[in-house]
Image: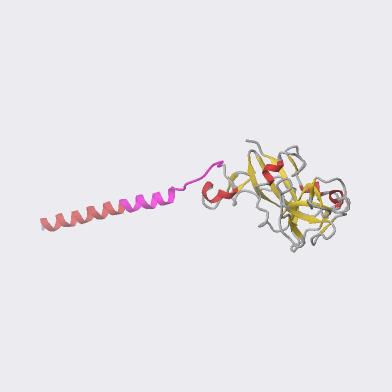
Amino acid sequence: MTAQRNARSRLIGRLLVLLVLLVLLVGLSHCYRPTYEGPYSCSPARASEDCPDGWQCQNGLCQDPSTQAPDTGACVGPGTLLTMSSGAAVWACEGSFPSGTYRSLCQSRASVHVCGEQRSDDALLAVLSCDSLRGFFLSSYSLALGGPPPGPVCDAVPSPSQALLGCGMADNIARLGGPTCHGLRHVLSCTSPSSGWSCDRTRALASVAHTATASSPGGVLCCEDVGP
């Protein structure tokens, strides 16, 4: 009888130990909730490595998409961050605008301007991957097409064959085969503009207009000073 009681006590003791361990494990599983408070700096090209799982890289910082509104950065409406370097960023700002009012797609604050209005924009524009960007996004640069060699003339004086420089691919968007112009090589000709676009061939930027649709996306390249 004594042996049986001892065996039963040992069994009960083991069961109690297992029960305590089980309670501890369940408690830990319910109490441990890792959180990420940030902010975490990130690069759009390395978002999966720089940010926690499920987070997004927006305007150089990791953001939780479940708690953060989409960041449109330098854009008045929808926009996509194309690149950021040395305290500056380039956004593809989508939308429509009437003739000559392309600046209206960029935020009206001192840190934002249409790309091309500052000489320092050239280095930033040169690293854009424009062949994979759907829709045309213009800069404030223009050039002249045609004429005698060397062909396209960057920063040309007003001429009857002006075109617009930008980033992105769409119908009737040409690609300069030679050197870039201010880091850009995608061209919208005013003599045969892409769908949704219009401009006068002698007053390119002063007359350009865009009507954005699902089949004709596009807008303006907006540059932003985001600091160090």
Q: Is residue 214 magenta?
A: no
Viewport quadrant of the C terminus: top right
Magenta region: which residues?
A: 20-40
Viewport quadrant of the N terminus: bottom left
Q: Nearer the viewer, residue 47 or 67?
A: 47
State left or right for residue 152 relative to residue 4: right
Query: Outermost residue, front direction?
Result: 149
How many numbered marks appear?
Answer: 0
Q: Tell me what residue is drawn at x 85 percent, y 59 percent.
A: 191
Q: Position of residue 133 (x, y in %)?
A: 68, 56
When the figure is inspected, residue 225 is found, relative to residue 95, above or below; the finding is above
Query: Outermost residue, top direction?
Result: 228
State left or right for residue 40 relative to residue 178: left
Q: Tell me what residue is drawn at x 22 percent, y 52 percent.
A: 13
Q: Nearer the viewer, residue 199 or 23?
A: 199
Q: Nearer the viewer, residue 227 or 31?
A: 227
Q: Position of residue 5 (x, y in %)?
A: 15, 56
Q: Position of residue 122 (x, y in %)?
A: 71, 43
Name the image quarter holding residue 108. Answer: top right
Name the image quarter holding residue 211. Answer: bottom right
Q: Position of residue 219 (x, y in %)?
A: 76, 53
Protein image colouring: secondary structure
